[in-house]
Image (spheres, rainbow, N blue to C red):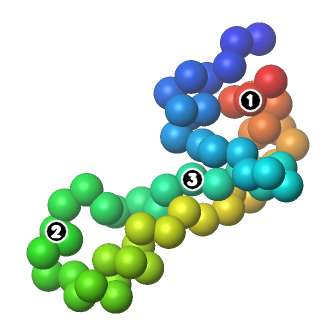
Amino acid sequence: MKTNKSFSKRLKVSKNGKITARKAGQNHFNAKESGRGQQNRNRSVPIHMTKGAIARFLP
């Protein structure tokens, strides 16, 4: 089975093996957001995937 490249390029694996990704909703409408709000949205978040999803996207 092939790895889903479009999905795998959006992910990063941390040193401890956690899978993280960028938060959604950061592409536009950022001018209204306060500086603190922009910092909060820039942080990446851990992704919780089932074993089936991991097998499907990241063999």
- Disc 1 designates what residue? 58
Determine contact: label 3, label 2, CB under 8 Å.
no
Q: What kind of residue is marked 3?
A: Ala
Residue 29 has which mark?
Answer: 2
The residue at 80%/24% (across/down) is 59
Using the rendered view, name the quadrant where residue 38 is placed: bottom left
Closer to the eye: label 3 or 1? 3
Horizontal relation, residue 47 to residue 15: left or right: left
Q: Residues within 10 Å of mark 3 (few under 14, many from 20)?
A: some
The residue at 82%/31% (across/down) is 55
Q: Is 25 in front, or is 34? A: 34
**Vertical placement of residue 29 versus 8, above or below:** below
| Mark 3 → mark 1, Cα distance in angstroms | 14 Å
Q: What kind of residue is marked 1?
A: Leu
Q: Is 52 in front, or is 23? A: 23
| Mark 2 → mark 1, Cα distance in angstroms | 32 Å
Q: What kind of residue is marked 2?
A: Phe
Horizontal relation, residue 6 to residue 24: left or right: right
The residue at 27%/85% (across/down) is 35
| Mark 3 → mark 2, Cα distance in angstroms | 20 Å
Helix, strand or loop at mark 2: loop
Residue 21 has which mark?
Answer: 3
Q: Which of the two labelled residues, at mark 3 and mark 2, occupies the earlier sequence position?
A: 3
Helix, strand or loop at mark 1: loop
**Vertical placement of residue 37 versus 1, above or below:** below
Residue 38 has which mark?
Answer: none
Instruction: Give how far across and how far down residue 37 sits, in percent.
Output: 34, 84
Using the rendered view, name the quadrant where residue 56 is placed: top right
Instruction: Give how far across and how far down residue 11 sits, in percent.
Output: 60, 43
**Vertical placement of residue 24 versus 37, above or below:** above
